[in-house]
Amino acid sequence: LAATDRSLVIALAATDRSLVIALAATDRSLVIAFAATDRSLVIALAATNRSLVIAFAATDRSLVIALAATDRSLVIAFAATDRSLVIALAATDRSLVIALAAT
């Protein structure tokens, strides 16, 4: 039903998180719609869908900081556009700062 009735899927999402996770791979716009109300869902998807995490970074810095500990390459990708984020992480991850120094 998801392909023909998105409003139905949205209605079910509140009661069935596994459904949302299953749809994430085929319907990114749906996942983005849920992100504002369910941060834990976004974190769960981060491991399998990096481009989705990048899309959220601009509006939710705390999410990026939360992911930094488990996905260093993601933090490096943001460094060029968000210096304040790199500075915030520097205190806890010196090797990251050294890696960024060249650029």
Image (tube, rainbow, N blue to C red):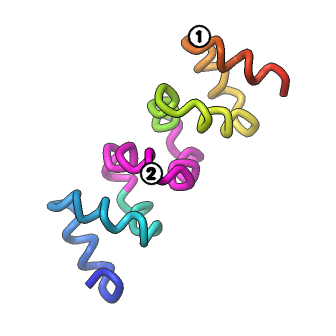
Sequence-first tag of 1 and 2: 2
User: Residue 49 location, x and y as percent?
Assistant: 48, 53
Q: Is residue 6 above or below residue 12?
A: below
Q: Nearer the viewer, residue 84 or 86?
A: 86
Mark pair 1, 2: CA separation: 28 Å
Q: Are marks 1 and 2 in contact (CB under 8 Å)?
A: no
**In the displayed structure, does residue 6 sit left or right of residue 84?**
left
Residue extending furthest toward the bottom: 4
| Residue occupied by mark 1 | 91
**In the displayed structure, does residue 28 sit left or right of residue 57?**
left
| Dot 2 amino acid type | Thr
Q: Secondary structure at mark 2?
A: loop
Q: Residue at x 26, y 85 (%)?
A: 1
Local packing at callout 2 (Cα closer than 10 Å; few below 14, some 14-19, many 20+) is: few
Q: Is residue 6 above or below residue 89?
A: below
| Residue occupied by mark 2 | 48
Q: Identify the image quadrant of residue 97.
A: top right
Q: Nearer the viewer, residue 43 or 99?
A: 99
User: Residue 87 location, x and y as percent?
Assistant: 66, 19
In front of the other: label 1 or label 2?
2
Magenta span: 35-61
User: Residue 26 location, x and y as percent?
Assistant: 42, 71
Q: Is residue 29 above or below residue 45?
A: below
Q: Nearer the viewer, residue 18 or 31?
A: 18
Q: Main secondary structure of the magenta part?
A: helix
User: Residue 37 location, x and y as percent?
Assistant: 32, 52
Residue extending furthest toward the right: 102
Q: Identify the image quadrant of residue 72.
A: top right
Local packing at callout 1 (Cα closer than 10 Å; few below 14, some 14-19, many 20+) is: few
**In the displayed structure, does residue 45 sit left or right of residue 16?**
right
